[in-house]
Amino acid sequence: MKQFPSKVLKVSVRCYEARIGSLGGITTTNVLVDHSRILWSSEKQDEYTTLGDAEFPFSITLPKDEGGFSTTSYVEYKVRISLTA
């Protein structure tokens, strides 16, 4: 298994607003809501550390009043894991 040098492991739940142009491509993207949690960070903030083989269980609770700017809901969930370098 390949080891990745990392400084922080963070998970986020975000709501994006995307504007689609006349040719069908996305022209702009705005983050409307962002709830993040740091699961792991390097002991020395300025140095990279190998994350290794580990499990990081987590939960993120969204506030009940976090409705966003619309009452319309188009549900699409994507999971993306990123290591901040």
Image (cartoon, helix red, strand yellow):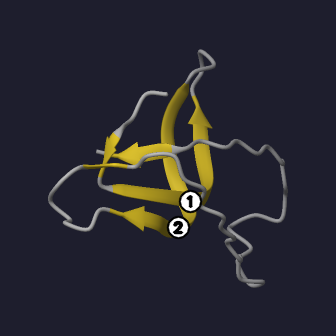
Above/below status of 23 relative to 1: above
Q: Which residue is mark 2?
A: 36
Q: Is residue 16 left or right of residue 8?
A: right
Q: Is residue 50 left or right of residue 1?
A: left
Residue 20 occupies which quadrant of the picture? top right
Residue found at x 36% / y 57%: 8
Classify mark 2: helix, strand or loop: strand
Which residue type does callout 2 highlight? Ser
Q: Where residue 45 sits in the image (x, y, percent)? A: 20, 65
Name, please, the residue furthest toward the left. Answer: 46
Q: Nearer the viewer, residue 43 or 32?
A: 43
Residue found at x 69% / y 69%: 68
Name, please, the residue furthest toward the top. Answer: 23
Q: Where residue 49 sits in the image (x, y, percent)? A: 27, 51
Label 2 environment density (alpha carbons within 10 Å; few <14, some 14–19, many ≥20): few
Q: Nearer the viewer, residue 21 or 40?
A: 40
Q: CA distance from mark 1 to mark 2?
A: 4 Å
Classify mark 1: helix, strand or loop: strand
Q: Which residue is mark 1?
A: 12
Q: Is residue 19 left or right of residue 62?
A: left
Residue 67 got which mark?
Answer: none
Above/below status of 80 relative to 7: above
